[in-house]
């Protein structure tokens, strides 16, 4: 069955390792017959602007972030997708701050009514793609993976599928020449 898949590349580098991996995952998903939207946060106006806790989204009946930038429509469109892949590099033992800023703005897609959670994200299956220059354990990639696991648990969703490319893949050229990692990324996309 064909799915709608959104892949969000959260690297500050437009043509870095994460963009390469996100592209390969997209290729695999398309090859499996899925409809794919590849969003590169670095190309959007508002990139890196996280939640400022203004609570405007919570005072409204509409699930919308108060910021008028190009990130807001991405957040609003997420509920139209079956799967959302959060792809990010590890920078200093956690996901790059741009991905964290994007995830923080998920708050605009969550509301409470008499203590009951209501969210536009309730039917999405999340996945994670992580790039790092060291192993998964040593790089801090697990910090990002664990935070998304907490998010999916909060939303009542299954744990995310995880793809990791690391351990000596500091440059795009090194990663691109690693046929095994490229094939694994494409296979990850097909399996979504």
Image (cartoon, rainbow, N blue to C red):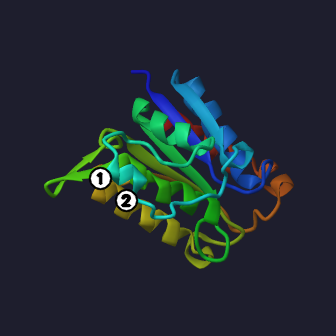
- Residue 164, relative to residue 73: is it above or below? below
Residue 175: percent from left, percent from top: 77, 54
The secondary element bearing badge 2 is classed as helix
Q: Is residue 181 left or right of residue 31?
A: right
Numbered mark located on residue 121 in the image: none
Are the residues tagged 1 and 2 within 8 Å (C-beta)? yes
Residue 102: image quadrant is bottom right
- Residue 97, relative to residue 6: is it above or below? below
**Which residue lies under the disc numbered 1?**
155
Quote the CA–CA distance across marks 1 and 2: 6 Å
- Residue 30, relative to residue 152: is it above or below? above
At horizontal 69% and vertical 68% (from top left) the residue drawn is 167
At horizontal 61% and vertical 76% (from top left) the residue drawn is 93
- How many neighbours does mark 1 have within 10 angstroms: few (below 14), some (14-19), or many (20 or more)? some
Whether residue 74 can be seen here? yes
In-front residue for pair 68/45: 68
Residue 115: percent from left, percent from top: 15, 58
Numbered mark located on residue 151 in the image: 2
Residue 34: percent from left, percent from top: 51, 24
At horizontal 52% and vertical 21% (from top left) the residue drawn is 33
């Amino acid at each position: 069955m064909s799915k709608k898949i959104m892949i969000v590349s959260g690297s500050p580098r437009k043509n870095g390792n994460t963009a390469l991996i996100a592209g390969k995952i997209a290729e695999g998903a398309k090859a499996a017959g899925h409809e794919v939207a590849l969003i590169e946060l670095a190309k959007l106006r508002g990139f890196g602007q996280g939640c400022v806790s203004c609570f405007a989204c919570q005072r409204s009946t509409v699930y919308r972030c108060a910021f008028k930038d190009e990130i807001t429509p991405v957040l609003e469109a997420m509920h139209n997708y079956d799967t959302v892949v959060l792809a990010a590099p590890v920078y200093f033992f956690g996901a790059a701050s741009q991905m964290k800023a994007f995830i923080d703005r998920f708050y605009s897609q969550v509301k409470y009514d008499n203590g009951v959670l209501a969210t536009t994200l309730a039917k999405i299956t999340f996945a994670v793609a992580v790039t790092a220059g060291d192993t998964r354990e040593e790089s801090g990639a697990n910090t990002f993976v664990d935070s998304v696991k907490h998010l999916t648990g909060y939303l009542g969703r299954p744990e995310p599928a995880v793809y990791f490319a690391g351990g000596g893949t500091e440059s795009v050229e090194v990663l691109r020449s690693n046929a095994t990692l490229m094939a694994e990324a494409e296979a990850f996309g097909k399996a979504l």
